[in-house]
Image (cartoon, rainbow, N blue to C red):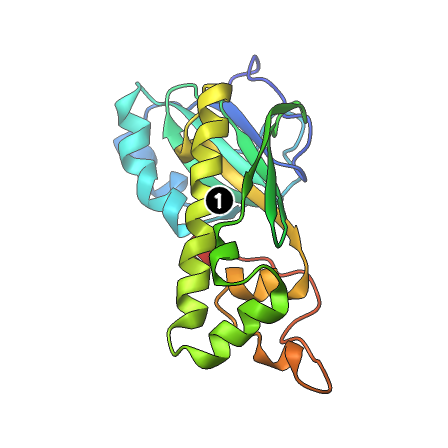
Amino acid sequence: AESGAPRPRSLRRGSAFCAKAPPPLVTANARRSNGRPVAPPPGASDIKLDLSLRALRSLPTALRAAAFELTAVVVGHRLVAIEPGDTSAECFGLALDLGTTTIVAAVIDLTSGEIVALGSALNDQERFGADVISRITHTMETPTGVTKLRETVLASINELLVRLLGSAEGSREHVYHAIVAGNSTMLHLLLAVDPAAIALAPFSSAFCEPLDLAAHEVA
């Protein structure tokens, strides 16, 4: 990377940095094939970055699309995206409070930590029941109940996200990290995990600890 490349504020929170890669030389191909096609940002050379398959697939096109200038997006120690040109100004995360009645979301600039958009929407799952017991009952009495409730809440979340990104002048492609909080039933339904055991003695959840999931696993 060039010495003038900006340093991300926090690799743990999430960041995007722009780098200029030197064009590869035919005689240097063997030496450059070392599994680290993108260097860590300035001042963080001691941090090992894990390269996602999605980022690796985009690397060849990204390198040549903007004269070897690219933006690398890092969440934790994982390199999650490589984009042509300088897109470091658009690096967003989503904080989501998944309530039984209301969904509240904040779009956050991952580089600065600032909230750039905040809003709420009704949880459309309400049409299947006003409380969690009613919704669990629906999943127990309807074969496709879990799937339907999952699809419904995802639609509510996506509609809210589109509205918030519009006000923040951002795009869904530049949301790289999300944290979701909610009660056990809401989280089970979001992930399409059968919540029936929550309503039956001894009232146990399929999971209690935080889960670290890729977006494609959830939606």
On screen, 180 above or below 114? below
Give how far across and how far down residue 129 sits, in percent: 54, 63
Local crowd at mark 1 within 10 Å, few (<14), some, or many (≥20)?
many
Residue found at x 48% / y 53%: 153
Q: Nearer the viewer, residue 86 or 59?
A: 86
Residue found at x 66% / y 75%: 205
Residue found at x 62% / y 55%: 100
Does residue 113 appear in this view? yes
Q: Nearer the viewer, residue 173 or 7?
A: 173
Q: Nearer the viewer, residue 33 or 83?
A: 83
Give how far across and how far down residue 151 sits, in percent: 40, 57
On screen, residue 102 versus residue 168, left or right, reads: right
On screen, 139 above or below 43? below
Residue found at x 39% / y 39%: 32
**Where, by quadrant of the figure, is residue 117 drawn?**
top right
Does residue 37 appear in this view? no
On screen, residue 145 versus residue 135, left or right, reads: left
| Count of all numbered marks drawn on residues in the image | 1
Q: Residue furthest right?
A: 202
Give how far across and how far down residue 17 sits, in percent: 53, 25
Give how far across and how far down residue 213 sits, in percent: 54, 57
Q: Residue furthest bottom?
A: 201
On screen, residue 63 versus residue 96, left or right, reads: left
**Where, by quadrant of the figure, is residue 83 drawn?**
top left
Q: Name the secondary structure under disc 1.
A: helix
The amino acid type found where label 1 is placed reads Ile
Q: Nearer the viewer, residue 95 or 196?
A: 196
Q: Which corner quadrant holds the C terminus? A: bottom left
Q: Which residue is mark 1?
A: 157
